[in-house]
Image: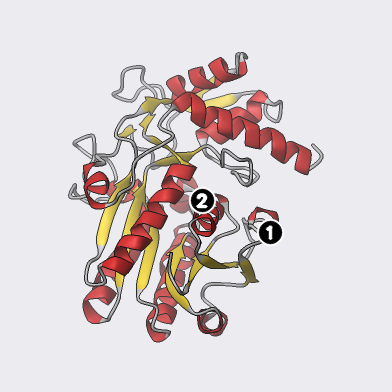
Amino acid sequence: MSDGAVLVTGGAGYIGSHAVLALLDAGHRVVVVDNLSTGFPFLVDPRATLVQGEIEDEALVRGAMRDHGVIAVMHFAGSIIVPESVTDPLKYYRNNTVASRSLIGSAVASGVRHFIFSSTAATYGMPEIVPVSEDSPKLPINPYGTSKLMTELMLRDVAAAHDFNYCALRYFNVAGADPQGRTGQSTAGATHLIKIAVEAAIGKRDHVTVFGTDYDTADGTGVRDYIHVSDLAAAHVDALGLLIARPGESHTLNCGYGRGYSVNEVLDAVDRVTNLKIERRYAERRLGDAGELVADNRRILETLPWRPKRDDLDGIVKDALAWERKLAEIRGE
């Protein structure tokens, strides 16, 4: 618990709203800055202060930092759809890289010394060795991964030049929802597999498309390391504690469980949990998708007190399904 507030960008979105809950539950004061382009005010816990606006609006962000006594930033705002980044790269360099530069500039100008960044396993591209360690080559194969890697490099350089430290958390595949039903993935047209599958389970879709059946994996479908969003949020709180305790250190850490499941294995889990048989339709690979991405998570386990509490695929699906049903009630669907 800290004396100052934590500014959370994108705190009305999926992962950001879970981090807000984790921070509040740990006793931190929280101010959220979100333009609500993909976020929803009802996902922001009422204990937090919501400021609607752009993170590039330096007057607004610096004012929020000043008015709320902000000592740290957790940065989730940005664009996250890999295929879209291939077809509209300039959107990703604007929303992810240029906007992050403005936010980092506001933090430095305001004397905010700690910065936690929502990065991605897409920075690794098509890794030759799996599980992937933090020291693996960073060779992103799409503008989404490149835009995130550029922000990591900015943070590295800013930390070398200023009284400032950071933790870049490279997410693998984030899934599930708050077990207490307070928030979850709510974006229409989401591309997350488990989100799509539970939408199909409650009748919002008539099938799930499996992109690619010819990968070099056990069943030919893509393999990913699925981490429960509440475990991921807890890692952010622990990372904040480390940055405050050790102001001279910065860190880059993989966030995953260290094992992967194929698309078919995930859909099997959804069938098990729902006692349904969701229709699967098979299609060509999508642009910019790697065949297998699994985290080597030894460094985060060595660096933080964080330990996974929800490393269970069926449990992840159950929480996602419960949220999907609640979301349908909220929206009267």
Which residue carries the number 1 mark? 41
Question: Would residue 241 be found to the left or right of residue 10 on screen?
Answer: left
Q: CA distance from mark 2 to mark 1?
A: 14 Å
Residue type marked 1: Pro
The residue under the point 44% across, 34% down is: 310
Residue type marked 2: Ile
Residue 243 position, x and y percent, is 31, 65
Earlier along the polypeptide chain: callout 2 or callout 1? 2
Front-most of residues 206 and 323: 323
Q: Secondary structure at mark 1?
A: helix
Which residue carries the number 2 mark? 15
In the picture as drawn, the residue positioned furthest to the right comes out as 332
Residue 21 position, x and y percent, is 55, 54
Residue 317 position, x and y percent, is 53, 28
Q: Quadrant of residue 11?
A: bottom right
Is residue 75 depicted above or below 3 in this figure? Answer: above
Q: Residues within 10 Å of mark 2 (few under 14, many from 20)?
A: many
